Image (spheres, grey):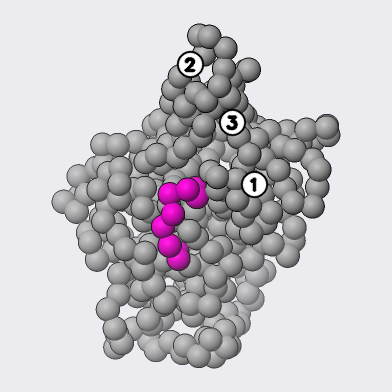
Amino acid sequence: MRSLALPLVVLVTTSCIPPDEDAISTVEQEARCPDEGCGVNSPYVDGGWFHELNLDGFRNDEGWAFTGASKGSAIYTLSVENARFVARLKLGPVGSQTLLTGDELVDLELHLTRSGTTTTYTATITDVGDRTEFLAKHTDQTPIDETIETYKIWVNANGSPWSGMLCGRQAIPTHGPVPMPEHSVLVFEGDRIDGLAKTVTAVNPRWFNLGCEGTALAKLHLTGRTQAAQQSVGFTTSLGERQAMLKMLTADYCGGGTPFTVGGQKLEWKDDQGTMTLPSIPLELESRWNAQGALCLNTPRVTANPTPQSEEEFGHKVSLQIAAECSRVHHQLPTCGFIPGPYNLSSHNVIE
């Protein structure tokens, strides 16, 4: 089963510094798996503070900038290639490793600054994993051979006693054949993602995303909906198809960026390419999706399978809230008897 979550953020790191309350929007969802190993929603879209960094030192929307990388006394040029960190020697003593990949990245330090403060930050890779598997499959339903590299990163605010895991939030894990390790992050280059609007707007390989375990950003890559997944394992998706996945994961029915789901929410889905299919359990169609959001809506997922968290968040008025949001963005949703256009994905509620 898949699931969704709530609070959407724009982030790349997770628990180093508590994110500003007004920076956290809401929601996000997870990927599909059977009941005995079900993936569930996370309350964050990407983890905490921001979701992207630029390799050339340009600041992101939250004011964070990557300024360089080092290991010991050697200085490295960092890149993200096919969703993996790669570091090449720029300057260092004789005998320094010229190329760092995989486990060789352990102890590599990424240096960060943030506008408005003189504090500098050091994000150190403490562990590298290579066993996480894609949730999507080939169109013939054979598994993807390529695994996803994940990292654990420890962050220090230099000159301050503060320190913590980059992905330190307690998250509902993304389960699957081999899930991401706890507190880990995956990276992928290219896609420019607006966490508030929940849009995928462009591809620029000098920007990279960090998706913490259990977040919507991580799930985009796990389901093959990133430029890096297209380059590395051959998933073929357009920006619109990637955006449709983001809208569905976050239950952004009306397309304006407002999510209507909570952590742990049950959900299943399938795509029009056959890379993600439905399990053989009782299901009921919830919505059909394209890049603009839902094309139609039957029973919202939090109504079909309410949880204590969903009742606290939405009460029994979620349908009215969705209708009000859709009126705000001038996008009323019919039920799914008639489909007013092509769609990429369909989401399905589990019948219990």
Magenta stretch in the rendered image? 200-212
Residue 69: assigned label:
3
Of 230 and 347, nearer the camera is: 230
Residue visible at 40% across and 39% down in the picture = 81
The x, y position of residue 263, in whole percent, is 56, 58
Please, is residue 284 above or below residue 173 in the view? Answer: below
Magenta stretch encompasses residue 246? no
Q: In x, y percent, where is residue 220? A: 42, 54
Indicate which disc residue 97 carries: 2
Q: Residue at x 45, y 31 (%)?
A: 86
Q: Residue furthest top?
A: 95
Q: Closer to the camera, 105 or 318?
A: 105
Name the residue: 83% across, 34% down: 160
- Name which of mark 1 and mark 2 comes first in the sequence: 1
Label 3 vs 2, first from the N-terminus:
3
Q: What residue is drawn where x is 74% and y is 51%?
A: 115
Number of on-image labels: 3
Q: For the residues marked 1 and 2, what is the alpha-carbon distance in whole angstroms?
A: 26 Å
Does the magenta stretch mainly form a helix, a strand or a loop? Answer: strand
